[in-house]
Amino acid sequence: MDNKEIFNRIFPTACRYMRVDPLKVDEGFNDKSFKTFETLIDNVRFKGQHEFISVTDLMNIDSDLTSSSEDLSFYLEGCKEVVVFATTLGVNVDSYSKKLQANDMGTAVIYDALASALLEFMTDEYEDGLNLGAHTFRFAPGYGDIPIQLNYIIIDALSISKKIGIYKASNNMMLPQKSMITFCGMGKEVAPTCAHCIRLNNCSLRKENLRCYNS
Amino acid sequence: MLKDLLGKKTLFFDGAMGTQLQANGLSIGAIPEELNIDRPELLVMIHENYLKAGADFITTNTFGANAHKMSRAKYPNTEMIKAAVKNADIARKNLGRENDSYIALDIGPIGELLAPIGTLSFDDAYELFKEQIVCVKDDIDVIIFETFGDLYELKAGVLAAKENCDKPIFVSVSFDKSGRTLTGTNPETYINVMEGLKVDAIGVNCSLGPKELEPVILTLLEKSHLPVLIQPNAGLPTLKDGKTVFELTPESFIDALQNVINEGIAVIGGCCGTSPEFIKAEKESFPEFVKQREVPLRTAVSSSTTTVYLDESVRVCGERLNPTGKKKLQAALREENYEMLISEAIAQEDAGARVLDVNVGLPGIDEAAVMRKIIPMLQEVVSIPLQIDSSNADAIEAACRIYNGKPLINSVNGKDAVMDAVFPTAVKYGGVVIGLALSEEVPKLCEERVAIAEKIIKKAESYGLNKKDLVIDCLTLTVSAQQAEARETLKALRMVTDMGLSSTLGVSNISFGLPNRPLINRTFLTLAMYSGLKMPIINPLDRSLMDCIDAFNVISNVDVGCETYIKNQENVVVQTVTVTKTAGSEGGASSQGGAASQKDVGFCIAKGLKDEITAVTIAELEKTDAMDLINATIIPALNKVGRDYDSGKIFLPQLIQAAETAKVAFAEVQKHFTVSSEKKGPVILCTVEGDIHDIGKNIVKVVCESYGYEIIDLGKDVPVDSVVDAYKEYKPKAIGLSALMTTTVENMKRTIAALRANDCDVPILVGGAVLTDEIAKEINADYYTEDAMSLVNLLKELNV
């Protein structure tokens, strides 16, 4: 897939992050966004890691935390195994963003939104490349009542800092900023739809007739 | 003694610890270091197996034993470290190997990135490492820092080791397939920085197998003067029946090392997936003695990602971060408003500077404290090395300590007292030092300057600095006052070059007091480069000087194929310049208006034409009063942009672009006021403690500034007390707090409570992705604003 194709795939999502209506975008804004995207791509050093672990191991990783989440048990019901994904665009993306924020804030906003959308896209591609078979959609600590503190435990337990360079920052945040840790439950197919989502009745995107997944 | 053998006889480390522990029942999420106390017999057995296989070093099971990582462990980290060393000692005693094996205290990364990328301070990192070392410093033989991905963190560790322990220090980092560490350091930079810090062995481990690491290993062997240590993984991990396994056997591991096995590796071991069988195979295959390598010394300075050689072609040092004669920069430094320095740094790097001079010396300023603040800020936004420029030895020491890389120090001269004050810092932190060829006064003759250079070399060598860690400044004197000395400078450059030294000059002093200074500057620069000048200190934004260097590089056959020249010059329109000899400034200058003259200020703001707004504003100020331009054009244009944003006609990026453009216009207009009567505010902005996401706060800042508000930006992750202190110091008219994460809203609440407790009576505004009106009320904020525009509207309503 060339840069233009990837850009076309992620641009609507990036627009959503910028609160821009993709249908109202003029040529100038589109061109500027693509130019920014090409700079972004030059800075990206995508890294992914995945580990298959049993649901029991995941639940025991810090049982105080995992047992406090009803949603985690709900989503993994019927699964024996979980794939844990860790993906990042790398530290260069953060550095360049900082430079832009110092001298070209307008472009920095576009760059940041494109980077977020690109991370999701590249994680999707990474997941697709694994041919997982039946699995739930990906979800992350912080979604529903799944404790965000799990990020920290997982980073250490799976040596993620050492392997792909995602580090802990204060308050359970991760660095580089464009990084994520997600899970899929294995063995049952649960598509990413509103019907399967715990925020079905409480979603700001849905109220605006938008979706967080490709419908 | 280890130091007698190192680099002469091939020495063997052990292999993987984690793999061995997992094979013996360590579960996912369990803390390996707890086993040092819970199952000492297991650790002793693993160590014994490696010793029996031929290892000379036993690595303690302490990779993650820093206080941060061990916060969930059931034992204090220092107890687990002591137990680990004891287990290693028992193992070697059990086998009678007390006298011919070494206990290596294993130290891995802390697991958090250091500021400015992350939030952990350099000093905190230092303390964490120090704690790990001090508790066992008398019971170990060597310290190994391994699997590091961040050069800055490694520097903190090495300093903690050197300042608290006298044992040899080995360092080993991980490189990925691109040949860089996770934070972007390449092997050359890693070598340059670690050699400067004077570690005892330098190496690579983990991440990849021996074949994939071969290019990095060859670079280490080719460029490093230190013993080289390698500990590859047992190949790349693959998934087999849902389990991670490594692809290589001991035999195929050795096969993969064939191209490097006889090239001078001093220490060899193994990382993930290796076992005693791998160490046994290494012992049987590697030569007994280490091949000695000839590696030439170079003059090189580094940031964390870039190494610049100062002994090959011409490299420009940007001179603009120096307050001498720059009133705006002086004011910015006094007000601790470092934004201007950041912009200047970025502009100079973008214009082609390869090193940046940093000078913050002003009467009444605590230079050391400012250096400690500004160096990380600059290194966050530029990737080139910095030149620490000060006559204050304490400031140089402070800057070199906090600097990420191998710095250039500007400067010493021929006076003993100056050299005695600066050389110890250069030795300790591994700096390259500029030596000014002057003593009590500037010598007139070339030979006198060279004699001072020789004195500097001799003194440097007495401190253990090599002459390749010196750059000689042959001194530019003003040609209008001391005409004959210019030739002496050029002669001195030639002689210094012939002595095998690198050289530098501040170029533009040459023309002081003469008309058409650029002509003299260009001519002198060309002659100086021809005489051997390697690092001109100039303004890289001066295209005429930079073009001279491009042309020189073509003619001297450095720019092979004229590639750089063509890239930089292909779009230059050559005009015949006729210099008109008039007293005024009107004659001869061509109009810069062009297309810009057809646009007005309002149009440029609406369209966000930041690059054109200055020329348009200047043109309009010739026919319009400054105050009228603000009230009748700039403010209405901004208001229209704001309304268009509110109604969805334009979007956030366009709003910001317009705001940035208006800010530039304001700056131009303000030059026409004798007093800055238009400033509103001040308003304090910050992202609260624990939150590192500051793009939202930065957007608000730009938009507010475009409306003329003075913003005091405290930055991100700002401690509660710092916000209170800033409130007392700046007496703002409003305070804006930002948070992105639910988890940091609690800190926002604490910040507000602390402000209230200190009688803060100005409006406190909050914003950020997780904030709502309800949450704002809950945490006792006065107002919630959804975005930058609504915040500006609120400030207007509040008459801030």
Image (spheres, coloured by chain):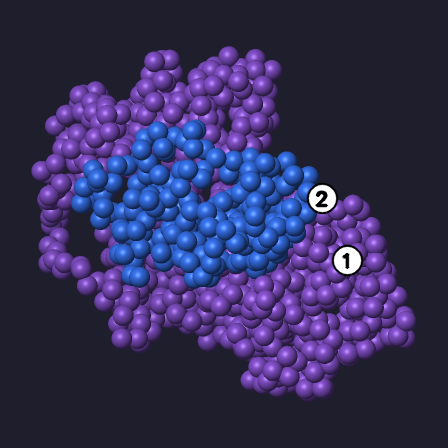
On the image, numbered disc 2 is attached to which residue?
Answer: B71
Position in image of residue B404 (x %, y %): 55, 54
Towards the viewer: B59 or B520: B59
Colour given to chain A in the rendered image: blue
Q: Quadrant of residue A5?
A: bottom left
Q: Residues within 10 Å of mark 2 (few under 14, many from 20)?
A: few
Q: Is residue B25 left or right of residue B100?
A: left
On the image, numbered disc 1 is attached to which residue?
Answer: B165
Can you see residue B326? no
Q: Disc 1 marks which amino acid?
A: Cys
Q: Which chain is purple?
A: B
Position in image of residue B145 (x %, y %): 67, 61
Please name the residue shown 70% across and 83% down the image.
B281
Q: Is residue B312 above or below residue B602?
A: below
Q: Is residue B386 above or below residue B200?
A: above
Position in image of residue B282 (x %, y %): 69, 81
